[in-house]
Image (spheres, rainbow, N blue to C red):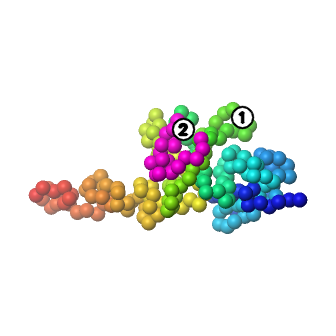
Amino acid sequence: GRRYARENTVKVTNVDIKKVSMIDFIVAVENSIGEGSCFACVPRPPSSIEITVDSEENAIKLCDEGLDINSDKYSVELCFSKNTVVSIFNLPSHIDDVVITEKLEQYKIEIVDNVVRHYYKQRPDVADGTRHVKCKFPPNFHSLPWAMQFDTPDGPQTFKVLHNNQSKVCFKCLSPDHEKKACPKIQCRKCRVYGHMAFNCETSKCENCNRYVTLCAC
């Protein structure tokens, strides 16, 4: 008979469950791992879905490949795994996988497996710019930001980042307690004081030299 095992259950996050049909997810799962392989598809408000399949092997396959639904790509994570799959979207193909792992390791994130490139379903020999990497976050690590910066031929650019249980954190230091514009580690380009950005600078200027008082030598 059917076995609804926890190790066979995966989670899809960042889903608009009010707009996306559960049937679409069931079809996508069975297109990926075989007809009749999807045992349960349970929406978990506000933005995730738990899917139970027929084997742990197929659950892992879904995590490795992700799901393509209506031209959207969804990362898949084992519900009861200590690992987290980080997905980076639209990344130029020439950026080496080592660049990704080194950037993650700067946050003391342990890389569990090799970076995996995602391919077009119709052309499985052509990468679509999405990379997945299985990681283990350190204790008390809240979240990666929604975007990460990489160097490109056009200069530094940011690329969308998704993983399960992702939350809003400071882009600079990853603290959940403030946004980048109020980060104590960021320095204002105008007054050179830490804790705010130039567009948010309220430092007054010297009446004599018209320089910011923090830079004034009067």
Q: Which residue is mark 2?
A: 97
Q: Please determine whether, in this image, residue 198 is positioned above or below residue 112.
A: below
What range is drawn magenta here?
Answer: 96-114
Q: Which residue is mark 1?
A: 123
Q: Amino acid at mark 1?
A: Arg
* Picture coordinates of residue 169, whole percent (x, y): 48, 60
* Picture coordinates of residue 56, whole percent (x, y): 75, 52
Query: Which one is in front, 195 or 8?
Result: 8
Mark 1 lies on a secondary structure that is: loop
> How many numbered discs sit on the rendered protein?
2
Image point 89% across, 59% down: which residue?
1
Q: Examine the rendering and report whether any part of residue 103 can be seen.
A: yes
Q: Examine the rendering and report whether any part of residue 51 can be seen.
A: no
Q: Amino acid at mark 2?
A: Asp
Q: Is residue 100 magenta?
A: yes
Hey, which residue is sitting farthest left in the picture?
218
Mark 2 lies on a secondary structure that is: helix
Q: Please determine whether, in this image, residue 106 is positioned above or below residue 191.
A: above
* Picture coordinates of residue 38, whole percent (x, y): 81, 55
